[in-house]
Each structure stands twice: as structure tokens, then as C-alpha cells.
Image: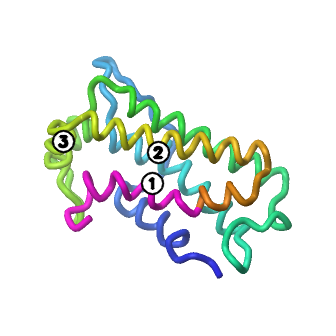
Amino acid sequence: MRKIAMLVGPALLLAAWGAAGASVAWASDDEAVYVRQIMQGGIGTATTDLWAVGNKAMGDEGGIDPALMDDASWAKLEKSAELLESEARGMAQAEIIRAAVAEEADYEEPGTYSMADVQSYIDADPQAFRDLAGALGDHAAALAEAARNKDTATAGTLVDGLDSACEACHAKYWYPNG
């Protein structure tokens, strides 16, 4: 049985952050990271690809069915997890964290906090934000390792748990109702 979260997760992520694009560099001239750009770029791309592989290879009992994985699927899982790890670690290591670039500082999407509110929550405890980003990076690193080892049990558990790893941050910083 396919899990609803794995089907709905990418849609919610893209609805909240816009269409995913190419990876966004972490630092600009002022060495700040811009979370909304990173979410729309590398993180959005990586998570969408991870869920796509997981959905395609999900067995009837959940988890990844090894019979539904080929070398290309394993490579995509590994590459996407590595991108997610890199983007998350960039946020975790940032000295300056901005919710959005100046042109988008007033951006508001229905059902989400305004970028000004997001910035105030990050500013109130930037280390908590870094810790959540680091935890996402750890999750992604473990998933990349599972993909390298073609470990279907671990990879399936980690793909399945990706929604929870993302939601830990989203509930605190992005969605008023958690």
C-alpha cells in the first residue's frame, strides 16, 4: 500500500515553496543563506526526486521493493540524497540565515507564516534552526549511504521518514498550525 504522505508530501512542499529549480548557492556576497531560495532550489528538487524514486519502488507492504529498483534508480536516490545533505548542511553551518531575499521579504502564501514572521522565528533561536537543518543533513547522509549499499530496508525507512524530517522544521518555522 502506497503511503499518502509520500504522495502528498511533494505537492505540499512545492505548493509552499514554488516550483523546484536548480540548486541555489548557499552564500551570497554577504555570506547569508536564503532559506526560501534553497527550499525552492536544491531541497525542493532533491526531496521531489527522493519521493519519486520511493513511490515508484514502493512494495505492497510499504518500503522499497528491491525488484522495483535498478541501477539508475539507486543512482538517482544516492545523488538526490547527496544534494539534500549538501543543501541542509549549508543551512546548518550558516552564520547568517535569512528567510528570503530582500525582494521576497514581504512574501506571504496562504496557510504559511509571512517571510517576516519566519525571519523573526529564526532570529529568536538561530541555533535551533541550524540543528534542524543538521538533522535533515544527517538523515540525507544516511539515505545516500543506504543507496550506495543498495540497502532496500534502510533506504525505504529513510525515504518514508523524510516527510517527518522536513515537517520538524516546517511545523516550527513555516506553518502556523504546525
- Please provide percent x and percent y for residue 11: 46, 67
Magenta run includes residue 64: no
Q: Which mark is residue 136?
A: 2
Q: Is residue 47 above or below residue 97?
A: below
Which stretch did the figure color magenta?
160-178
What residue lies at 49% left-to-right and 63% top-to-bottom? 10
SS type, badge 2: helix
In percent of the image, x 39 and y 56: which residue is there? 18
Asked whether, in this view, residue 72 is left or right of residue 88, the answer is: right
Return the residue nearer the eye: 9 or 172: 172
Q: What's the amino acid at mark 1?
A: Ala
The answer to whether the residue labelled 2 contacts the one labelled 1, judged by CB atoms less than 8 Å apart, is yes
Where disc 1 sits, the SS reads: helix
Give the residue drawn at x 66%, y 63%.
54
The numbered mark at residue 165 is 1
- Horizontal and vertical percent position of residue 39: 41, 46
Pointer 1 or 3: first along the chain: 3
